[in-house]
C-alpha cells in the first residue's frame, strides 16, 4: 500500500472516531436522564404528569425531525448537518444544566432533540459513504455499534453516580467537553461537503406534512396515559397527515422521501420489523429499571450497574461477532438468530417473582440481550441495502425514525398496560410489590409477543439472498 493510500485509510478511521464521539454524547444523554428523573422532580417541583415532558419533549423533536434532517443533509451537506446538530445539542445541554425552572428545562430538552436529530440522521449515511467496501463497512459499523452500547452503559452508571454525588445538573454538563471536542475535530477531520444543492426543489409541503405527522404521532403515543381517548384522536390525525405526505411524495418533482425506497420489500420489511423489535426492547429497558427500583429497592447507581451486563454483551457482540456472522451466514439468518435470543430473554421475565434473585432471575436476561447486537446490525444492513449514495441520508433518517417511533410506542403502551394492571390489583387489595410485578409480567409477555411477530415477518418478508460479502451496519442507538 502506498503512503498516500495508507493516509487515506487512516483518515477514514479517524473520521469514524469523530462520528463515534459525537454520537457518544447523544447516546449518553439518552440513557443518563432516566435514572435522574426522581431528583429532577424533587428539585424543580414537577408533578408526575409534567415530569414526563423532560423525556417527551426530546422524543417529539427527535422523532419528528429525523426524516427532514436526513434529506436536508443530502441537499446541504452531511458534514454541515452533523456539525450544526452537535453545536445545537451542546448549547442545549448547557441550558439544561443551568435550568432553574420547569419551562426552561423542557424547552432545552426540545432543543436537544432538534440537535440530536440533525446529527443522528446523517451519521449512518456518512459511514456508508466513508466505507463502501463491505468488509471494512462491517468493521466500521460494528465499532460504531460498540460505542453506542458503551455510551448507554456509561450513561446508566454515570447518571446514578453523578445524581447522587453532585446533583442532576451534571448529567447535562458532561456533554459539554465531548460536544466541543467533537465539533472541532469534525471540522478538521470529516471530508468537506461539496457545494450545497438548491433548496428550491425541496418539497416544503411534504416536509411540513411529515414533520407535523411524526410530531403529532409521537405526542399521541407518549400522552396515551394522560389523554386517553384524546390520544387516539391525535393518533388518527397523525395517520391522516402521514397519508397526505405519501400522496404528496407521489407528485413531488423532488420528493422528501423517494417512494422507490419503500417499494423495496427488504427496506420496508426491515423498518417494520424494527418498530416491533424496538417497541419490545425499549419497553423492557424502562420497565426493568422500574422493577429494580420500585420492587427490589435498588438505588439509581445500583440500577445502572445491574443493567450493565446487557450493554456490555450487546457492545461486544456488535464489535466482535456481527460483521463476521453477517458475512458468513447472511443478514437474514443472523437476524433470525438474534430475534430468537431476544424472545428467550424477554420471555424469561414473564415469570419474574416479587423477591427475584439477580443472578437467577435477571442476569440470564441481561446476557441473552446480546441477541440485540446481532439483530440490529443485520437489520440495519437490510434497511440500507438499496440506498443509493444520493439517498443515504434520507434512508438513514427513515431507519432512525422508525427506531424512535418504535421506542416511544413501546414505552408508552407497555408502561400504560403495566400501570393499569397494577392499579387494578391494588384496588383488589394486593400489595404494591405484588401488583407492580404482575403488571410488569403482563408487559413483558406482550413484548415477547411483539418479538415473535417480528421473527415471523423476517421469515416471511425478508428473503433476501445472502451476498458473498455482506455489509454489517448496526444501530445509531443501542438498546441500553
Image: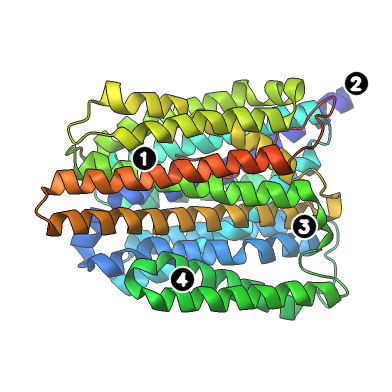
Task: Report x, y in % for residue 101.
Answer: 28, 71
Viewer-closest of 211 and 88: 211
Q: Depth-wise, is mark 4 or mark 1 nearer the camera?
A: 4
Residue count near mark 1 (Cα–Cα under 10 Å), binned few <14, some 14–19, many ≥20: many
**Residue at label 1?**
156
**Residue at label 4?**
220
Q: Earlier in the sequence, mark 3 or mark 1?
A: 1
Determine which of the numbered discs, if any, sits on residue 262 in the image: 3
Q: Which quadrant would residue 137 be assigned to in this image?
A: top right
Q: Earlier in the sequence, mark 3 or mark 4?
A: 4
Whether 115 is drawn above or below 457: the answer is below
Q: Viewed as shown, does residue 318 lie left or right of 134?
A: left
The residue that appears at 20% across and 67% down in the rendered structure is 45
The residue that appears at 54% across and 24% down in the rendered structure is 316
Whether 126 is drawn above or below 115: the answer is above
For the N terminus, the image quarter is: top right
Q: Secondary structure at mark 3?
A: helix
Residue count near mark 3 (Cα–Cα under 10 Å), binned few <14, some 14–19, many ≥20: some
Mark pair 3, 2: CA separation: 42 Å
Residue count near mark 2 (Cα–Cα under 10 Å), binned few <14, some 14–19, many ≥20: few
Q: Earlier in the sequence, mark 3 or mark 2?
A: 2
Q: Secondary structure at mark 1?
A: helix
Viewer-closest of 392 and 283: 283
Q: Earlier in the sequence, mark 4 or mark 2?
A: 2
Res. 353 in view: yes
Determine which of the numbered discs, if any, sits on residue 186 in the image: none
Amino acid at each position: 500500500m502506498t503512503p498516500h493510500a495508507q493516509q487515506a485509510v487512516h483518515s477514514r478511521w479517524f473520521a469514524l472516531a469523530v462520528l463515534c464521539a459525537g454520537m457518544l454524547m447523544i447516546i449518553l444523554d439518552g440513557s443518563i436522564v432516566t435514572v435522574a428523573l426522581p431528583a429532577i422532580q424533587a428539585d424543580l417541583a414537577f408533578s408526575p404528569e409534567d415530569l414526563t415532558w423532560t423525556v417527551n419533549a426530546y422524543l417529539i423533536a427527535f422523532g419528528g425531525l429525523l426524516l427532514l434532517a436526513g434529506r436536508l443533509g443530502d441537499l446541504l451537506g452531511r458534514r454541515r448537518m452533523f456539525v450544526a446538530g452537535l453545536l445545537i445539542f451542546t448549547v442545549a445541554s448547557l441550558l439544561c444544566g443551568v435550568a432553574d425552572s420547569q419551562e426552561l428545562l423542557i424547552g432545552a430538552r426540545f432543543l436537544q432533540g432538534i440537535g440530536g436529530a440533525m446529527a443522528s440522521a446523517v451519521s449512518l449515511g456518512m459511514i456508508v459513504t466513508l466505507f463502501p467496501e463491505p468488509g471494512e463497512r462491517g468493521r466500521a459499523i460494528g465499532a460504531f455499534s460498540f460505542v453506542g452500547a458503551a455510551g448507554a452503559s456509561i450513561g446508566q452508571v454515570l447518571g446514578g453516580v453523578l445524581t447522587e454525588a453532585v446533583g442532576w445538573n451534571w448529567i447535562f454538563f458532561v456533554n459539554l467537553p465531548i460536544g466541543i471536542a467533537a465539533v472541532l475535530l469534525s471540522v478538521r477531520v470529516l471530508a468537506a461537503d461539496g457545494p450545497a444543492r438548491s433548496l428550491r426543489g425541496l418539497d416544503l409541503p411534504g416536509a411540513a406534512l411529515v414533520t407535523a405527522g411524526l410530531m403529532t404521532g409521537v405526542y399521541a403515543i407518549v400522552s396515551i396515559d394522560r389523554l386517553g381517548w384524546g390520544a387516539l384522536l391525535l393518533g388518527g390525525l397523525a395517520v391522516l397527515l402521514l397519508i397526505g405526505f405519501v400522496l404528496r411524495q407521489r407528485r413531488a418533482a423532488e420528493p422528501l422521501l423517494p417512494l422507490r425506497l419503500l417499494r423495496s420489500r427488504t427496506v420496508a420489511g426491515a423498518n417494520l420489523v424494527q418498530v416491533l423489535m424496538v417497541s419490545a426492547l425499549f419497553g423492557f429497558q424502562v420497565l426493568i429499571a422500574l422493577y429494580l427500583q420500585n420492587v427490589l429497592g435498588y438505588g439509581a447507581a445500583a440500577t445502572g450497574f445491574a443493567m450493565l451486563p446487557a450493554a456490555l454483551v450487546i457492545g461486544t457482540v456488535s464489535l466482535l461477532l456481527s460483521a463476521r456472522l453477517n458475512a458468513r451466514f447472511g443478514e437474514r439468518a443472523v437476524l433470525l438468530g438474534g430475534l430468537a435470543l431476544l424472545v428467550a430473554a424477554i420471555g424469561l421475565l414473564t415469570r419474574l417473582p416479587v423477591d427475584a434473585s439477580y443472578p437467577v432471575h435477571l442476569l440470564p436476561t441481561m446476557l441473552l440481550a446480546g441477541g440485540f447486537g446481532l439483530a440490529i446490525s443485520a437489520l440495519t444492513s437490510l434497511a440500507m441495502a438499496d440506498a443509493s449514495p444520493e439517498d443515504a441520508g434520507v434512508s438513514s433518517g427513515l431507519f432512525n425514525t422508525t427506531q424512535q417511533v418504535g421506542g416511544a410506542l413501546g414505552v408508552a403502551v407497555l408502561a400504560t398496560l403495566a400501570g393499569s394492571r397494577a392499579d387494578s390489583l391494588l384496588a383488589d387489595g394486593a400489595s404494591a410489590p405484588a401488583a407492580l410485578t404482575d403488571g410488569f409480567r403482563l408487559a413483558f409477555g406482550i413484548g415477547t409477543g411483539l418479538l415473535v411477530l417480528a421473527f415471523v415477518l423476517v421469515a416471511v418478508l425478508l428473503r433476501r439472498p445472502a451476498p458473498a460479502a455482506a455489509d454489517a451496519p448496526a444501530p445509531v442507538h443501542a438498546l441500553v
